[in-house]
Each structure stands twice: as structure tokens, then as C-alpha cells.
Image (spheres, rainbow, N blue to C red):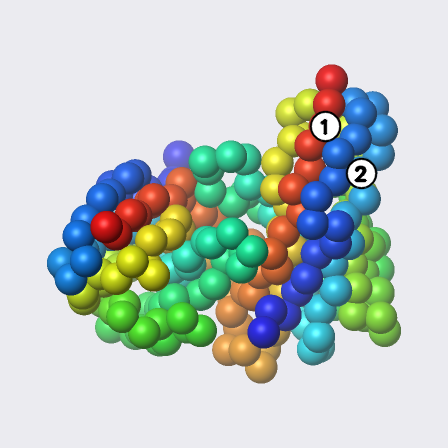
Amino acid sequence: DAEITQSPRHKITETGRQVTLACHQTWNHNNMFWYRQDLGHGLRLIHYSYGVQDTNKGEVSDGYSVSRSNTEDLPLTLESAASSQTSVYFCASRVTLNSPLHFGNGTRLTVT
Amino acid sequence: SQQGEEDPQALSIQEGENATMNCSYKTSINNLQWYRQNSGRGLVHLILIRSNEREKHSGRLRVTLDTSKKSSSLLITASRAADTASYFCATDVQEYGNKLVFGAGTILRVKS
């Protein structure tokens, strides 16, 4: 069965370090998204991509970057981790715009 | 600011009762989607209702959409303990670049 996997599931890092969260989907979806989830804020969009070599900023993109070199992967990089980036991160994909999202199980990131 | 906002924030009911959650949004939409999130997991798509639809059913789920009031409701009938989860509405808005925008969610607890 097609799926979307995130790794690692849990990560603890120190302030100032660079961190990369992996997202891999086997749905062959062009559209991929990164969200962060914090209490009281729901899910907020960080970055998204509509296809290979396409990346776009979401509403909370400062301090994050993504790259899309193939259809399956959209890694999220925190350039210099800050305590405010402690959160649960979700990757998602969908086949077309206006269709349902498929989510990974998330990465819980703690920045100390 | 968030496009979709759910109410109530939390709901506690007995098994067998019906649960109703509401979602309000601010701008015109292409469709509205409802998702469920179990603790520690990613979101799972439940149902999608298009802007030209008024009601949709899926098993024990019933979703209504009132575009004149910019609101939607999710009804879960004959609730079960396994329905305990957080429920989110999300709106697909063309002016937001065809991205799904999520509300903060309703936490549903079904007591057995």
C-alpha cells in the first residue's frame, strides 16, 4: 500500500544546530506540504511544493527551508534550531489540489 | 489568522450519544474537509464536501455546509469510545494558492 513516512519520529537537538526532517511518500503525488502543530494553533503551513524543483513559503516559513529533487521526498531543514521551533511536524501529500491530504505520523522535535 | 475555527474546543459525551462539532470560516471556499487525529498520530481524512453541496454522509458521519453563513457541522451519530480523538476542519481556498488551511480543532472524548 502507498504511504507517507516521516523520520525520525522523535528528535532532540540543541539550539543553533541544523536539523533535517525527512518525508518520503510512495503515492507519487506532486503536491507535498509541511505543517507544524502546536497547542492552540492547530496546524500551520511551513512550506509546500507542487512538483520537482518547485518550493513555496507558507505562513510560518522563517527559519525553515525545503528542497524537492524528486517526486517522493520533501526534506525540511531547520537552518539554526531555536526553542520556538519545538513542535510536532507533519508532512502531507495529495494527488491534486482540492483533494484530501494524506499525512505522515509526525516528528516530535525538541530544541533545548 | 485562521480560516477555519471549530467549536466547541472540547466535548465530552457518553457512548451512544451524538456528537456535533461546528466550523466557521471567513472567505469563499472550493471545498471543506474534516479530519480526525488520534493521540500521537497523523491526521486522517474523513469527508470532503464541495462548495455546491449542502450535505454529505459517510457511515455514522454527517456533514453539512452552509456557504451563506460560512459554516459547516460534523455530526457523529451513536458515538463509540473509539471516536475519542481531535477533529479538524480544513478549507481549500483558491485565493490562498490552493492550500488547505486548518482550524484549531475540537477534542472529543467519548466515555464508555
The residue singled out by tag 2 in the image is B19
Label 1 close to label 2 by CB (< 8 Å): yes
Q: Is residue B80 above or below residue A62?
A: above
Q: Residue furthest left?
A: A17
Q: Amino acid at mark 2?
A: Ala
Which residue is more in the foreground, A69 or B35? Answer: B35
Q: Amino acid at mark 1?
A: Val
The residue singled out by tag 1 in the image is B110
Measured as percent of width and height from the top left, residue B51 is found at 74, 68
Looking at the figure, which quarter contains the N terminus of chain B? bottom right
Residue at position x 54%, y 65% from top? B100
Give the SS element for disc 1.
strand
Q: Is residue B39 above or below residue A45?
A: above
Measured as percent of width and height from the top left, residue A100 is found at 55, 54
Q: Residue furthest bottom?
A: B95
Measured as percent of width and height from the top left, residue B93 is found at 61, 73
